[in-house]
Structure formats: C-alpha cells, structure tokens
Amino acid sequence: MKDLKDYVRTIPDFPEKGIMFRDITSVLQDPEGFHLAIDKMQEMVADLDFDVVLGAESRGFIFSAPIAYTRGKALVPVRKKGKLPCETIEVEYDLEYGKAVLEIHKDAIKPGQKVLLVDDLMATGGTIEAMIKLVEQLGGEVAGVAVLMELKGLNGRERISKYRLDAAISYEGK
C-alpha cells in the first residue's frame, strides 16, 4: 500500500514563486487515497474523548463528517460569515492576505462539551485558533485538533501550543 503522502500532488510556484502547493484534491480523487486519509485521521483520534466534531468550511467538512459518523458524535459546521441561518457568534481572524470571519450557531455547543476540531490543513494556525475561540466562547472544551496536513514551516502548531494537534501528513516547509 502507498503512503498517504504519495497521494498528495505538489505544485511548485503556486500561488506564487517559491511556494510548494500541496494539493489534497488528488487524495480525494483516488478512492484508495481518500480511504487511507479517513482511516489515518480516525486512528489519530481513537484515544480522544469528545462529544462533538467541529468541521471548518469547507474542506474540513470532508474529513469531519466521517469521524463524527463512525464515532456516533454530533457534527457541527463552522462557516464563513453569513452562511448560517440561526443566531450565531463570530470571530475575525487574520489570513495570509487579509482577514476572514468564522461563525457558529449559538446553540451548537453546550457548556462542558468536549470538542474535536477538524480541518484539512494547518498552516499558520489562524483558522484553528478562530475555531478554538468559538468553542471556548460557547463554554466548550477543546479535546484536540485533527488535520489531514500540517505545513510545519508556517509555525501554526506554536500558535495553538496549549492544545493537542494530530496531523496525518506533515511537511517541513511552507
């Protein structure tokens, strides 16, 4: 069987010169690669105790849904501003080239619930840090963070160092 990294397509100089873009669509498009990715992420969190899986829009939904389903847990989407129909709380955070806002329904997490955060990528840590703030504002406890891929050269792990982070794939660069 191939290693999970073997399914990731690397595109040099995208979106700008010097960047090695790690494309997960090639993982998703290959049934074996996708299966391996989900299995690996399931294994990473097998020892965690959590009540809720929080998936980040949009690629985080792909990986959070199977984890919630197989573990029999609730799935809560964290969405970009203006996408959720009920009363929300929000947090603004910095992107590499600007700012963004994430929202969650006010009633999505109950005080004391343990929450697993799931996304496709940990780069600078901005999205994960914003998700942590939302969970904690609602009185939830972050049980851990699971991502398909971590770009270690962008130091996101340091930004959320208080929390457990598991990555199925890690790259040293950016």
Image (spheres, grey):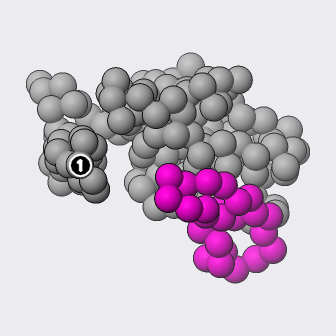
Tell me where the magenta segment starts and ends, as one range.
80-103
Q: Within the magenta stretch, is there residue 94?
A: yes
Q: Quadrant of the C terminus?
A: top left
Front in this rendered view, residue 168 or 76: 168
Image-based side of 123 in relation to 19, left or right: right
Q: Within the magenta stretch, is there residue 88?
A: yes
Q: Position of residue 122 (x, y in %)?
A: 47, 39
Query: The residue tagged with tag 1: helix, strand or loop?
Result: loop
Task: Identify which residue is drawn at 25% across, 42% down.
Answer: 18
Task: Identify which residue is drawn at 75% across, 51% down.
Answer: 134
Q: Quadrant of residue 12?
A: top left
Q: Quadrant of residue 149?
A: top left
Q: Quadrant of the N terminus?
A: top left
Question: What secondary structure predominates along the stretch shown in magenta?
Answer: strand
Q: Quadrant of residue 50?
A: top right
Q: Which residue is mark 1?
A: 17
Q: Position of residue 45 (x, y in %)?
A: 52, 27
The amino acid beneath tag 1 is: Lys
Q: Tell me if residue 100 comes above or below residue 53 in the rendering.
A: below
Q: Position of residue 52 (x, y in %)?
A: 66, 44
Q: Position of residue 67 (x, y in %)?
A: 48, 42
